C-alpha cells in the first residue's frame, strides 16, 4: 500500500534527515491518492512530513486533532500517545507539538502586508459571491483590538453562496473548488474539508468558510445556524481599521460564534492560540 510506504519513508527521514528528501513531492502524492476518507497511515504520514520539514504548524495541529479523534474512536489512545511521543522525541522535550518549531504568528508579522494580501484576494472573490467578509478569529481581532490577534496564525473569511438552502449550498460549495483551483488560489497541501484553504503571500493560512441565506436567516459553517437575520450581516460594511468588509453588526455574529462573553478574556483559549476576547468596534 503506497500510503503506508510513504508513512515509513517519512518516519525514516526523521532520523536520517537526508538533504535531498522530497517532502513536497510526497505530500503531493498523498493528495493524489486521497479518496475522501484518510486512513490513519495517511494522517500520520502527513504529520511526520510537516514535522520533519518544520512546516505549517496550523495545519499540523488540525491533522493531529483528526488523528487523535480517529484513534480515540477506535479505542487506540495508547497508539496515539506512542506516535506523539515519537514526534516529541524528534522535536525535543521542551517543544509543544504544533507550536514547537516557532510558528509565525501575527505577533511577528507585518499586518499591513497581510491586509494588502487579503484585500487583493477578497477583491477577486467578491465577483463569485453574494458577499465576502472577515469571519471568526479575524473578525474578533479587528472588532476587539482593531488588529489581528497576536497568537493567531490564520485569516478567516466568510463566503456567501447564492444558494437558498443547505443542499444547494453544499452543491455550490463543491463546485466552487474547481473555480478556486482555476484561479490559482487553492492551497492543496493544506486542504481541510469542508473549509477551503487559500494561498497567502506569507507564512499564515487563509480559511474560507461557506455561508448562505435561507428564508432570511444566515448560516455560516460551523458557528451560525440561522440565529442571525440577513440584516445582521448584509449588506456588509467596510472595517474602519482594514477597509475590508465585515458583517453589518459584527457584535451579533461574534456573540453567536463565541458566546455572550466574547468581550471578556478567555485564558484557556489564549493558551491554545485561539483567543476569544473583548471588544472595541471595528
Image (spheres, grey):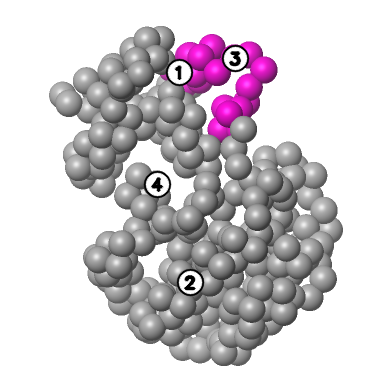
Instruction: Answer few, some or many: residues within 10 Å of disc 1's Cα (few below 14, many 20 plus, some between 14 and 19).
Output: some
Range shown magenta: 78-101
Q: Give the mark, 2 or 3, whose residue is nearer the N terminus.
A: 3
Q: Nearer the observer, disc 2 or disc 3? A: 2
Callout 1: SS:
helix
Callout 2: SS:
helix
State the residue position of label 2: 120
Quarter of the rendering occupied by the N terminus: top left
Camera-side residue: 198 or 81?
Answer: 198
State the residue position of label 3: 92
As drawn, the label of residue 142 is: none
As drawn, the label of residue 190 is: 4
| Any part of residue 50 in sight | yes
Q: Does the magenta segment cover residue 28?
A: no
Report which quarter residue 162 is drawn in.
bottom left
Q: Is residue 269 left or right of residue 217?
A: right
Q: Residue 254 location, x and y as percent? A: 68, 68
Amino acid at each position: 500500500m503506497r500510503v503506508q510506504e510513504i508513512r515509513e519513508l517519512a518516519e525514516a527521514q526523521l532520523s536520517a534527515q537526508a538533504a535531498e528528501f522530497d517532502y513536497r513531492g510526497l505530500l503531493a502524492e498523498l493528495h493524489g491518492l486521497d479518496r475522501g476518507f484518510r486512513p490513519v497511515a495517511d494522517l500520520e504520514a502527513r504529520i511526520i512530513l510537516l514535522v520533519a520539514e518544520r512546516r505549517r504548524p496550523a495545519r499540523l495541529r488540525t491533522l493531529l486533532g483528526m488523528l487523535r479523534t480517529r484513534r480515540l474512536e477506535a479505542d487506540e489512545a495508547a497508539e496515539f500517545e506512542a506516535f506523539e511521543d515519537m514526534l516529541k522525541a524528534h522535536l525535543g522535550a521542551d517543544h509543544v507539538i504544533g507550536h514547537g518549531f516557532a510558528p509565525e504568528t501575527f505577533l511577528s508579522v507585518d499586518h499591513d502586508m497581510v491586509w494588502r494580501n487579503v484585500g487583493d484576494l477578497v477583491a477577486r472573490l467578491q465577483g463569485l459571491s453574494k458577499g465576502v467578509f472577515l469571519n471568526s478569529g479575524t473578525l474578533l481581532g479587528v472588532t476587539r483590538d482593531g488588529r489581528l490577534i497576536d497568537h493567531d496564525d490564520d485569516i478567516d473569511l466568510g463566503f456567501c453562496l447564492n444558494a437558498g438552502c443547505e443542499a444547494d449550498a453544499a452543491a455550490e460549495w463543491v463546485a466552487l473548488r474547481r473555480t478556486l483551483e482555476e484561479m490559482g488560489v487553492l492551497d492543496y497541501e493544506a486542504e481541510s474539508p469542508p473549509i477551503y484553504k487559500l494561498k497567502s503571500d506569507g507564512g499564515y493560512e487563509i480559511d474560507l468558510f461557506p455561508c448562505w441565506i435561507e428564508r432570511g436567516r444566515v448560516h455560516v459553517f460551523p458557528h451560525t445556524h440561522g440565529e442571525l437575520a440577513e440584516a445582521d450581516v448584509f449588506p456588509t460594511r467596510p472595517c474602519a481599521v482594514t477597509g475590508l468588509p465585515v458583517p453589518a453588526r459584527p457584535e451579533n455574529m461574534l456573540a453567536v460564534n463565541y458566546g455572550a462573553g466574547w468581550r471578556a478574556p478567555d485564558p484557556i483559549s489564549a493558551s491554545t492560540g485561539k483567543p476569544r476576547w473583548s471588544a472595541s468596534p471595528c
